[in-house]
């Protein structure tokens, strides 16, 4: 069970749309409730803590509405937090997520929702959840790897067929430059709308890690859909030289993107000259 710091107190906060005196039952977490698979337990309580009693018409459809937010990677414990409400663990006592967990997830994910024109839902008001003086559950802390993370930002500029000098200047002024093919699906599906196709090639690696950069760029596209839609047309893929910085708070900011066309000799030259270039 991925829950720690269970603190026992006979008082349980009842701020959610849930009657703690009502009859509840334990049921298996449906396999098609994808976001709550592999959370450390296999049975959930119905009704759940959002007051939903029907798996097929309420719980599962509602869970899918959260998938796009979870795919942005806005907080490493967002999935555990949401599943503790949508598919609460079935034990002899009621265990809600701690207020501190809610606040941590809210602080990471509310800005992402705001970037997409949505507010943090009232039903997830963190004051409704119990503090550490009550019985609550918080996840085992993840090891902090201090990795750069995507965030909401103004759309970066793009420059077609740049000069060799402007390309070299952009690489010098930024922390990283990576060649990446950004792709967009034509039709809506259960998969994400945007992805990074093929192999990434670093011109300047800077603070980025090879194994993490693809996921980070894909999360950036999902967090900033209005920017992503301007960069790639539906059903198409576009190769870019992506430059950007890592801010002091660890967030990623894309600065200038160069569409990489086959006839663009200056981008090819810049990627070769960089290894021996001094800014």
Image (tube, rainbow, N blue to C red):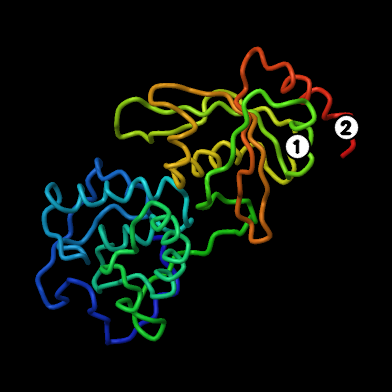
The structure residue drawn at horizontal position 12% and vertical position 59%, both measured from the top left corner, is 53
Tag 1: Cα neighbours inside 10 Å, few (<14), some, or many (≥20)?
A: many
Quarter of the image containing the C terminus? top right
The structure residue drawn at horizontal position 45% and vertical position 60%, both measured from the top left corner, is 111
Apparent side of residue 169 relative to residue 7 in the rendered image (left or right): right
For the residues labelled 1 and 2, say whether their Cβ atoms are less than 8 Å apart.
yes
Apparent side of residue 268 relative to residue 90 in the rendered image (left or right): right
Which of the labelled discs sits on residue 252, or is there none?
Answer: none
Q: Is residue 227 above or below residue 133?
A: above
Q: Where is residue 132, by image quadrant?
A: bottom left
Asked whether 187 or 136 is in front, the reply is 187
Q: Is residue 201 above or below residue 225?
A: above
The structure residue drawn at horizontal position 66% and vertical position 12%, both measured from the top left corner, is 263
Furthest-top residue in this view: 263
Apparent side of residue 269 relative to residue 143 in the rendered image (left or right): right
Measured from the top left, where is residue 173 in percent x and y? 76, 44
For disc 1, the marked residue is: 171
Measured from the top left, where is residue 197 in percent x and y? 52, 25
Tag 2: Cα neighbours inside 10 Å, few (<14), some, or many (≥20)?
A: few
Asked whether 222 or 5 is in front, the reply is 222
For disc 2, the marked residue is: 277
Q: Is residue 207 above or below residue 195?
A: below
Which comes sooner in the sequence, label 1 or label 2?
1
The structure residue drawn at horizontal position 61% and vertical position 48%, both measured from the top left corner, is 253
Asked whether 123 or 81 is in front, the reply is 123
Q: How many marks?
A: 2
Measured from the top left, where is residue 202 in percent x and y? 70, 31
């Amino acid at each position: 069970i991925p829950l720690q710091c269970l603190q026992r107190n006979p008082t349980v906060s009842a701020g959610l749309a849930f009657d703690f005196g009502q009859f509840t039952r334990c049921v298996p977490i449906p396999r098609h409730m994808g976001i709550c698979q592999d959370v450390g337990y296999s049975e959930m309580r119905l009704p759940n803590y959002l007051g939903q009693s029907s798996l097929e018409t309420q719980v599962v459809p509602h869970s899918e509405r959260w998938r796009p937010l979870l795919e942005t990677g806005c907080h490493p414990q967002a999935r555990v937090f949401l599943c503790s409400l949508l598919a609460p663990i079935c034990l002899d006592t009621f265990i809600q997520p701690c207020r501190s967990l809610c606040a941590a997830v809210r602080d990471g994910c509310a800005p992402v929702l705001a970037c997409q024109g949505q507010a943090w839902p009232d039903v997830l008001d963190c004051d409704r959840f119990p503090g550490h003086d009550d019985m609550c559950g918080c996840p085992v802390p993840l090891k902090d790897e201090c990795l750069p993370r995507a965030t909401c930002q103004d759309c970066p500029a793009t420059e077609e067929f740049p000069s060799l000098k402007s390309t070299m200047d952009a690489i010098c002024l930024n922390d990283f430059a990576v060649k990446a093919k950004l792709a967009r699906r034509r039709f809506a599906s259960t998969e994400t709308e945007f992805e990074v196709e093929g192999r990434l090639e670093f011109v300047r690696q800077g603070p980025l890690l090879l194994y993490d950069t693809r996921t980070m760029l894909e999360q950036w596209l999902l967090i900033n859909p209005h920017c992503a839609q301007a960069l790639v047309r539906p059903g198409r893929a576009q190769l870019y030289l992506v430059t950007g910085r890592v801010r002091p708070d660890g967030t990623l900011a894309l600065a200038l993107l160069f569409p990489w066309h086959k006839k663009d000799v200056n981008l090819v030259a810049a990627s070769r000259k960089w290894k021996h270039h001094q800014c």
